[in-house]
């Protein structure tokens, strides 16, 4: 009984399986499917957004790049949404509201006619949607805290693989549909996908505020029960310092900002300078998440065995090498080879930081998991 409650071993005495752990949980199953759908929808459009701005709204290449500066509002949205999630009775309610905002944002984007509209939509609506999606990962952490397992990193990796799976097929679909139907219908498809991502979580229940508080207290002080105030609400807690999280977030941003640059300019680079066909462009963009899917469980196991910091350091080195490869595509050898090399290296970056970064942030501020995840 103790083994089953702790989640440390299976009935056969073997280490727990992440997939089996997820299949037993209605919440984790629903979150996995939701992330797959969301990954498909977002990846259909995001690699094409610069083409939309240039072709449909007649932005210059430089102006199209400025669109991604609106992501600077994402940390603010993340803090607001995450803090609300930490104080709310249900993280899933916060996720659903943010998903509705995201669906509305993509629909409005599809009908945008003025240059200022994409900027306003991304800052006000899409940034909230991104922060809301992070609350699914926060709910996963709550579930892991409530029913612990030694397959902690592996469970987080599988959940992160869900969105990577969507990114495998999404760019190819987006490149083809964009060429056949046009870019505006593509944005509508994304809005529909974001809306549909709510459906797999119908009927799922995330840990309540009191349960989350009790689980964190139990993990930090084994054998102690969480103190509760009148009505079962959590008693006031001593807050953990935010400084380590802020430092780690700054490092994370420096490593990952190149991915945003790549999403902004690589499609234009392949189209305008390298003259790569639409289908091939989509295949190259889709190659990265395919490799990510394979590397994420490997990164989780390596972190469990050798430590998280070593794996993250390796990911940082791969980030530098990846962007050198992109920049060398038109000067060294067949350009497609260098693009593929860059995508393979960047897959290693996402596999390490995308999986382990979430876990590190959550552990740095265990009492504010929603905010840390955002």
Image (tube, helix red, strand yellow):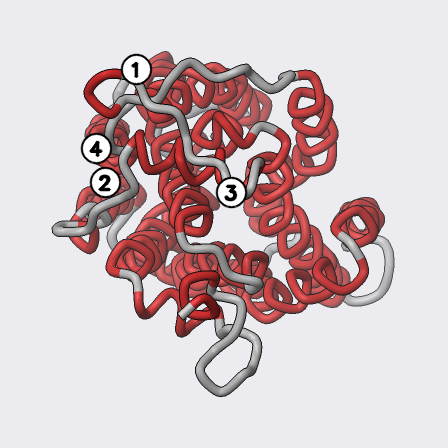
Measured along the vertical axis of the image, is residue 338 above or below residue 199? below
Looking at the image, residue 335 lies above or below residue 367? below
Q: Position of residue 92 (x, y in %)?
A: 25, 38
SS for callout 1: loop
Residue 93 is marked as 4
Q: Nearer the viewer, residue 149 or 93?
A: 149
Nearest to N terminus: mark 2 or mark 1: 1
Contact (CB < 8 A) between labels 4 and 1?
A: no
Q: Where does the image place residue 274, in percent across and percent down from the top left?
A: 66, 53
For disc 3, the marked residue is 223
Whole-Å distance between the Cαs marked 3 and 1?
Answer: 60 Å
Q: Label 1 belongs to which residue?
A: 114
Q: Nearer the viewer, residue 192 or 218?
A: 218
Q: Which of the two marks, 2 or 3, is nearer to us in this view?
A: 3
Marks 4/3: CA–CA distance:
31 Å
Residue designated by label 2:
191
Q: Is residue 304 visible?
A: yes
Disc 3, SS: loop
């Amino acid at each position: 009984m103790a083994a089953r409650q702790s989640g440390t071993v299976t009935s056969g005495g073997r280490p727990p399986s992440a997939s089996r752990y997820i299949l037993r949980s209605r919440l984790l199953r629903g979150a996995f499917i939701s992330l797959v759908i969301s990954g498909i929808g977002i990846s259909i459009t995001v690699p094409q957004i610069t083409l939309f701005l240039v072709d449909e709204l007649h932005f210059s290449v430089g102006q199209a790049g400025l669109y991604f500066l609106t992501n600077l509002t994402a940390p603010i949205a993340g803090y607001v949404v995450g803090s609300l999630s930490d104080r709310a009775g249900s993280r899933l309610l916060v996720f659903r509201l943010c998903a509705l905002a995201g669906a509305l944002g993509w629909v409005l984007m599809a009908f945008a006619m003025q240059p200022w509209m994409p900027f306003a939509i991304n800052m006000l609506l899409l940034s909230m949607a991104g922060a809301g999606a992070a609350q699914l990962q926060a709910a996963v952490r709550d579930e892991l805290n409530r029913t612990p397992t030694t397959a902690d990193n592996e469970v987080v990796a599988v959940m992160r693989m869900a969105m990577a799976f969507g990114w495998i097929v999404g760019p190819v679909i987006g490149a083809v549909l964009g060429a056949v139907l046009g870019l505006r219908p593509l944005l509508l498809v994304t809005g529909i996908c974001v809306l549909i991502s709510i459906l797999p979580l119908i009927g799922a229940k995330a840990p309540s505020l009191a349960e989350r508080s009790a689980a964190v207290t139990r993990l930090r002080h084994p054998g102690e029960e969480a103190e509760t105030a009148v009505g079962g609400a959590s008693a006031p807690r001593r807050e953990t310092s935010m400084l380590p999280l802020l430092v780690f977030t700054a490092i994370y941003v420096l490593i990952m900002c190149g991915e945003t640059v790549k999403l902004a300019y690589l499609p234009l680079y392949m189209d305008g300078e390298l003259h790569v066909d639409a289908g091939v462009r989509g295949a190259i963009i889709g190659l990265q998440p395919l490799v990510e899917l394979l590397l994420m469980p490997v990164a989780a196991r390596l972190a469990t065995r050798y430590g998280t910091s070593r794996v993250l350091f390796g990911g940082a080195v791969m980030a530098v090498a990846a962007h050198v490869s992109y920049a060398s595509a038109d000067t060294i050898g067949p350009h497609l080879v260098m693009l593929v090399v860059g995508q393979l290296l960047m897959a290693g970056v996402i596999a390490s930081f995308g999986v382990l970064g979430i876990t590190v942030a959550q552990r740095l501020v265990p009492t504010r998991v929603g905010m840390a995840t955002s």
